[in-house]
Image: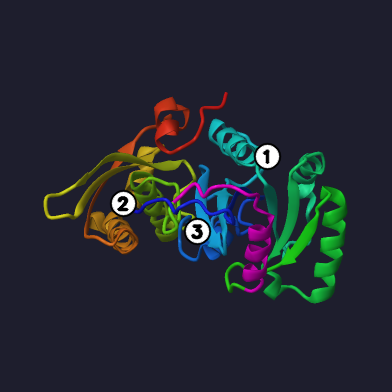
Amino acid sequence: MTEIPITSENHTCGLVAIIGAPNAGKSTLVNAIVGQKVAIVSNKAQTTRARLMGIAIEGDAQIMLVDTPGLFEPRRRLDRAMVHAAWEGAQEADAIVLVVDARKKRREYLEPILTSLASRKERRILVLNKVDAVPKEPLLVAAEELSAAGGFDEVFFISALTGDGVAELKARLGALMPKGTWHYPEDQVSDASERLLATEITREQLYRQLHDELPYDSAVRPESYKTRPDGSVEIHQQIVIARDSQRPIVLGKGGSKLKAIGEAARKELANLLGMRVHLFLHVKVEENWAESRELYEEIGLDWVK
């Protein structure tokens, strides 16, 4: 196991909360700053459910990036837990980064977020994302309006997908980190356990391969994670769905869809973990899984009434 670096008088370390509405590009940005994948990405909104931390190094600074669930108007218990996780991730942060999809012209959905941010004491940074798809003049107008509404200290224009502007943002975040000992080894890129990471990778494939066929009332539950004598890892997971009518969607003809989901997740996990992976998936119908306190704990969310 890698040792934590020897403390240097030049070391700085701090926490940055990445917040925003669903599908603004928060997870893509966290991955871009870290320099490799630590958070799952999907075109579907509300992909991130729990708080996941990416860890980036910028010179002598260790930046702990909290990738939070999207902020939106909660309707169900799961929604409330996700929004709670987002704001909790911003508590005591050294900087809060609000990521906004610059392509969206109507921004009424941001009003509650901006109101909450305006009264916060943390340093607030506005990041307009996906700017490669927007003319310059509307960008500047949006930046001015949003800055005034949220009391932002700084504004950055980036494309998390292409990497444009990310290096400048990372350098600035590094400069903002306070003096302090690094919390993690230099080569550690996430605080997520391999067990949780494995369920997130499978959930990402569930979204990617089923697109809009499967609603959000699904989850991936970890069952077991063990190392075999040959050094490979054996993982068993349960895909939880709310209705029996969804089972054929997940399974596919002759189990072909479930096999494809498992194979894609297995390959990505093997690449991330640097070892051979044996992944076993099965489907379970649990109508009220979104009311299960135990499952919330398993997927990294607090139980919120």
Point out residue 79 in the picture as x, y percentages from the top left corner.
58, 37
Q: Quadrant of the C terminus?
A: top right
Give the crowd class for mark 3: few <14, some 14-19, many >=20 residues within 10 Å.
many
Q: Are marks 3 and 1 in contact (CB under 8 Å)?
A: no
Q: Which residues are magenta?
A: 164-184
Point out residue 297 in the picture as x, y percentages from the top left corner.
43, 32
Q: Which residue is mark 2?
A: 1
Which element is circle 3 on? loop
Residue 182 located within the stretch drawn in magenta:
yes
Q: Is residue 33 above or below residue 85?
A: below
Q: Is residue 173 left or right of residue 184?
A: right
Residue drawn at x 47%, y 41% as measured from the top left: 217
Q: Is residue 12 above or below residue 287?
A: below
- Which is more N-terminal, label 1 or label 2? 2
Which element is circle 1 on? loop
- Which is more N-terminal, label 1 or label 3? 3
The span from disc 3 to disc 2 (Cα, nearest Å) is: 29 Å
Instruction: Identify residue type, mark 3.
Output: Val
Residue 37: quarter of image = bottom left
Q: Nearer the viewer, mark 2 or mark 1?
A: 2
Q: Which residue is mark 3?
A: 41
Instruction: Identify residue type, mark 1.
Output: Glu
Which residue is at the front of the view, 176 or 248? 176
Q: Is residue 169 above or below residue 44?
A: below
Residue 303 located within the stretch drawn in magenta:
no
Q: Which residue is mark 1?
A: 73
Q: Nearer the viewer, mark 3 or mark 2?
A: 2
